[in-house]
Amino acid sequence: MAKNLKGKELGKGIGQRKDGLYYARCTNRAGKRLEKCFSSLTEARNWQKEQNYLKLHTTQISVRIPESKPASDNSSMTVNEWFELWHKTMLTGLAENTKRNYRERYEINAKAILGDLRLTEVKPIHCQAVLNSMIGRYANSTIKQTYIAMGVLFKSAKINELIEKHPMDGVRFDGPIKAKDEIHFLTREEQKLFLETAKCSHNYVQYALILETGLRTGELIGLTWDAIDWDRHTLTVNKTMEFRYKQQEWRAGPPKTRNSYRTIPLTDRAYQLLWNLYIGREYRKEAEALNKTLTYIDRRTAKSVTFNMRDLVFINFRTGMPAKNSSYDTHLYKLCERGGIKNFCMHALRHTYATRAIESGMQPKILQKLLGHASIKTTMDLYVHVTDDAMFEAVKQFQQDRAI
């Protein structure tokens, strides 16, 4: 088993050269040995996984990848054909929302321009044309999603040696996803007013719990009793749940990313909110349809996990079923109107949790783990906001320290 320069074993077929580059080795279906070098260990492992997956599964797929020809000879596959193959084989383990977003952005925005082109014919000008056609018609965030979808689509084609150059090289989209001052969070006064207004709501515990834990809405909806350790005062995030309107059914899935699997220490307030629900669970209304088993794939083990919906923590008092994401937002708007607060959605509560955490002096690296982010940059750029009050307090403290 190969090792890195420090002597640590990296896994079968993975190693590090003296110049610092990592290499990955494997064989294709024909028994031909494949090897490629990468600047990072992650890239090497991902390439090896993709090649091994193709080795096992390409016989079941109608679109054949030429294995022995150089990229310049792979001229027959169209972008449409590659997208279907890529979407079916390369996205295993990703959240269903992510897979759906990739398909929507490709079919709605990119397919008309790129779909009938052969992979080897796609140039930066074609990709830029896709983005240019969206300007003024779509939100910047949607254009950015299309940019990302095309990027990973063609990156995978290059890794699999179907093309020699990445056609997105030089393609730019500089529009912001969302300006920082547009990312909504509650001030301390707004948070206090909101909680006072929400006390009359049957969703009060859900709102208060997000403000204590920073959970995503899907993580909150999919929370089951076995995820709570009453002795250790912790809550484990290991799945999400959402209602699919098109299929009219509930779907469970893994957390957003591998880093979204996490165990959160509960504050005393969060613990008490959950405990009060637990001791009263036998008296809640439960619909007959709630007695249903859902299955999802654990992205860490690639194994199926099942649970019964009766084990869910949060059930709507009126329907006896889980509340949908959209219904939470609709109810929030009514509470905002009642309390005289600017409208905000469920995700703003997660923003607010992160903001209060930083204001209290929490280290960003710890907050990153609590929020389940893969990158500290995401935590700092999207979720951490310095309020005016915090800035004044910081300058005041700085002034006092200088006076000593």
Image (cartoon, rainbow, N blue to C red):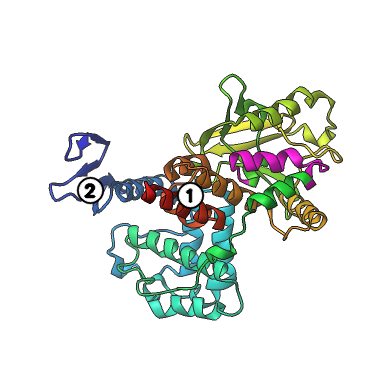
Q: Does residue 210 belong to the magenta stretch?
A: yes
Of helix, strand and loop, which mostly describes the magenta segment? helix
Q: Nearer the viewer, residue 304 or 208?
A: 208
Magenta-tinted stretch = 197-216
Q: Quadrant of the N terminus?
A: top left
- The location of residue 37, given as percent across then percent down, is 23, 53
Q: Nearer the viewer, residue 86 or 375?
A: 375
Q: Residues within 10 Å of mark 1 (few under 14, many from 20)?
A: few
Which residue is labeled 1 in the image?
A: 60
Three-letter amino acid code at the position of disc 2: Tyr
Residue beneath the point at 45% across and 73% down: 174
What number is the disc on residue 22? 2
Residue beneath the point at 79% across and 47% down: 197
As drawn, 176 above or below 247: below
* Furthest residue in direction top, as rendered: 231
- The location of residue 392, given as percent across then percent down, is 51, 56
The total number of labels drawn is: 2
370 vs 375, left or right, is: right
As drawn, 375 above or below 182: above
Three-letter amino acid code at the position of disc 1: Gln
Residue beneath the point at 48% across and 46% down: 373
Mark closest to the chain's N terminus, 1 or 2: 2
Callout 2: SS: strand
Residue 276: quarter of image: top right
Callout 1: SS: helix
